[in-house]
Amino acid sequence: MRIDRGLGGVRAYIRSAPGTYVWLAVLFLTTVALHQMSPEFEHHFLRQRSTNIHELSHNPVRVLVASAMWIDSGNWFPYVVLYTVFHASAEHWLGTARWLAVCALAHILASLISELALLVAIRNGVAPHTAVNTLDIGVSYALAGVIAVLTYRIARPWRYAYLTAVLLVFGLPLAEGPTFTDLGHLLAALIGLACYPLTRGRGKAWNPKETLAALRG
């Protein structure tokens, strides 16, 4: 009976975040496909779906969509945890449409702005011209945006501790040794924070203190 209740709870949680788990299923299929490719073909294949300067200048819509459907690390299992903890929580809280809006805004705007910054760096001689074909693919910008927007899911004063952690996680890499990807992650987090209007009217903020009190009985 306990196993049945547990499985029922898992199914209910997945149904409450359909977009998250459909996306995870797509990533599973594309990851399996990558494992069937030779390393040389895989690199060429992913480059054509990368949001780099070259591809964005020729096929912007195609690569912005396609880049969110592949994982260049080839390791799918960590994303099950990340998507369950962050994406599913955000989708359940915001609803699928608003959650998807946060994902799209963070992914698209962070990709475009970071690549524009890279283009400026190339033109100023700070980055090599070969960087126009840099591999930039994956789901991390959308994830960063969703992690950040969950700040508003947490009640004060706990919210400020979470916000500090978010800014440190995405800000420190940029401060220590900036890359255009690090810039993209910080931009995505800031875009997620700017999505506050989408969080209005989504119910009472979660208070960890109340949850602990309930667990203690």
Image (cartoon, helix red, strand yellow):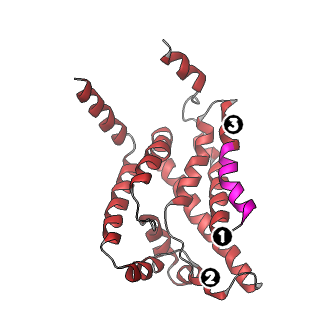
Q: What residue sits 45% from the left and 39% below the top?
A: 92
Please check the rendered image and state whether residue 173 is part of the magenta-colored stretch, yes or no: yes
Label located before the other in sequence (1 or 3): 3
Q: Is residue 197 left or right of residue 12?
A: right
Q: Quadrant of the N terminus?
A: top left
Relative to 29, residue 204 above or below:
above
Q: Position of residue 182 (x, y in %)?
A: 65, 63
Q: Residue at 48% of width from left, 53% of height from top?
A: 100
Mark 3: few/some/many CA within 10 Å (<14, 14-19, 20+): few
Residue 142 location (% of width, % of height): 53, 57
- The residue singled out by tag 3 in the image is 161
The disc at residue 79 is: none
Whether pointer 2 and pointer 1 mark residues with C-beta atoms closer than 8 Å, the reply is yes
Look at the picture and state if 38 lies above or below 100: below
Q: Is residue 65 left or right of residue 106?
A: left
- Rendered image: mark on residue 131: 2
Q: Nearer the viewer, residue 1 or 193?
A: 1
The question of residue 74 being in magenta is answered with: no
Q: Which residue is mark 1?
A: 180
Write down the region rendered in magenta.
Answer: 165-177
The Cα–Cα distance between marks 3 and 2, rounded to whole angstroms, is: 37 Å
User: Separation of disc 1 and disc 3 at Cα?
Assistant: 27 Å
Q: CA distance from mark 2 to mark 1?
A: 10 Å
Amino acid under disc 2: Ala
